[in-house]
Every structure is written in C-alpha cells, then in structure tokens.
Amino acid sequence: MMSLLSLLQMLYSQNDGDQIMMKERTGGVLSVDIAHRRYVDNGIVFLAQGSEKVQVVKTDDLGLRDPPTPEDFATALHSFCDRRGVSVLLLDGPQGWREPKSQIEHMRLCERVLNTPGKTGIVGTAKPGTYLPYIRFSIELFQHLRTLYGWELLTSDWIAHPWKQWLVESFPTSAWKTLGLKKLPAKAKSTRDQLIARRDDLSKITGLKLPKALTHDELQAAVVLPVGTAIVRGEDERVILSGIDPYLTKKGVVLEGLIANPCIPS
C-alpha cells in the first residue's frame, strides 16, 4: 500500500513527467531522544506538517514492550511516520562508526566538532566503553530504518532533494547552544523548575507550542525539532551541519556522518 508521503510526492510532481507542480516541501517531523535499556526512557515528540503544536508520543502507544531491540523500534517508528506523513526523523545517537583512516583519534569528526560525551570509534569500539551498548543500539536502529524502510541518511546536498525521507542524527546538548539558549542540565541534576524554564525559553524563541509537562528526555527531543522543520521547508540558513557525509564500506557499514543542529538566522 502506498504511504501518504509517497502519494503526495507523486501527485505534486506529476506534470508532463518533469515539472514540479508544487515546490513547497511537505511532511511532519518526529524526534527521538534515544534510550536503549527501557522503552519508557525514550523521549519522543511529533510535529505535524504546518503545525506549531508539539505532541508527545509514548512508546506504549507505539505497541513497544521491553526489552528494546533496534529492529522492533525501527518498525514502530517507521509505522508511525508512515501513518502521520513524517518526512524527517531525528535520532539522538550515532549513525555510523569512525573512519579507520581518519586522523582524528577515537571518534568521528562530528563528535570532535561538537564535543559529544560518547565517542564512536572504529567498528565495535567506543570511549568510554560504557557508551558502547547505546552506540551499537543507535547505529543498528539507523541501519534498520535505512535498509528495511528506505530512509536516507542526511547528506550535505539535502537541499537539492526535496522529496526524500531524511534520517537525521541530532545532538540536543549542542542544539540549546546553537539556538542561543542556556543548555538543559544533565537529567540527574535537572529540577522541575529548570525543566519549566527551559521549556518556556524554547517556546519563546522558536514559537513552538510545547506541552506543559515535559520530561527531560522529551524536552531534549523537542529542542532539535526546529532543524527538522527547517529541512522540511528547505531553509538551509536554519541548519548547521557538523562532520562529513556518511558513506558505506563495501561490506555495507556506515562510517562517519553529519550531526544537524538548528539555528535562528541573524
């Protein structure tokens, strides 16, 4: 059965087989702050096409039951995206491993640029080692979405491909900074008042209508939504890319990749 997004693409692009009838990009945005131990720890938020109202998505509503697996999670996320017309899916986690020939030690270029706490090494390695289960889970989640459901890893020429369903790596900690906001403290150190204050700050600067009660994970997922909407709309001046384009080895392993952050143009 043809998905809603595929149908829209066909309808808007059919005009003598060449000319695009409607240049405006379409689609919603789904953002996930990934947790690999329990589904309930994932923060998931959704922004429908043309809407400013952020909706929280619970893993129970997606029919997910512990223990988490990348394949089950990919299936549930894709199913939601297919039903709701999502064209940009943001995941807070690495999409690929470090290029073995890179002159940057222990991590990918994007992680060096943004100073991520977890460093993705060559296949099967990470620093610190405690991050490896999470990193492996994230990379496999990206892989299943890409290979089983046809999602495309974001590349630096994304602006030239308006109808692709983009799978985008995010890093919420840096998104607070690129939006000019005070970053959210670590989950264990965040107070209720801090969550409310950051929620209000984010709403004020972006115009997003955020639910009153957001968990730390949901707020982290929400802060990167603006880069998703910018990609949907083709607003490249609102997108900051760090790293290099992802690429495949002969064995089909993804290396490196871009992390996308939002910004408010001056």
Image (cartoon, rainbow, N blue to C red):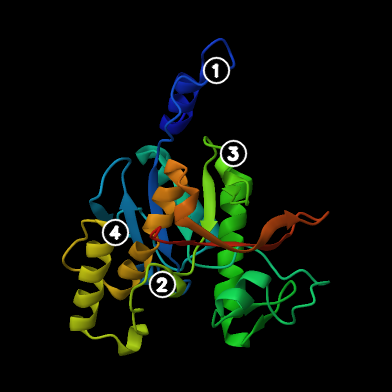
| Left or right relative to 99: residue 174 | left
Pointer 4 or 3: first along the chain: 3
Please provide percent x and percent y for residue 220: 36, 70
User: Depth check: 230 or 41 in front?
Assistant: 230
Rendered view: 223 above or below 120: above
How packed mark 1 is, by other alpha carbons closer than 10 Å (few <14, some 14-19, many 20 or more), is few
Q: Residue at x 62, y 55 (%)?
A: 143
How packed mark 3 is, by other alpha carbons closer than 10 Å (few <14, some 14-19, many 20 or more), is few
Check disc 2 and give the amino acid type.
Arg
Which secondary structure, mark 1? loop
Callout 4 touching callout 3 (CB < 8 Å): no
Pointer 3 or 1: first along the chain: 1
Pointer 3 or 2: first along the chain: 2
Q: Residue furthest top?
A: 16
Q: Residue at x 55, y 39 (%)?
A: 164
Return the residue at label 2: 38
Q: Quadrant of residue 11?
A: top left
Q: Quadrant of residue 63?
A: bottom left
Rendered view: 179 above or below 225: below
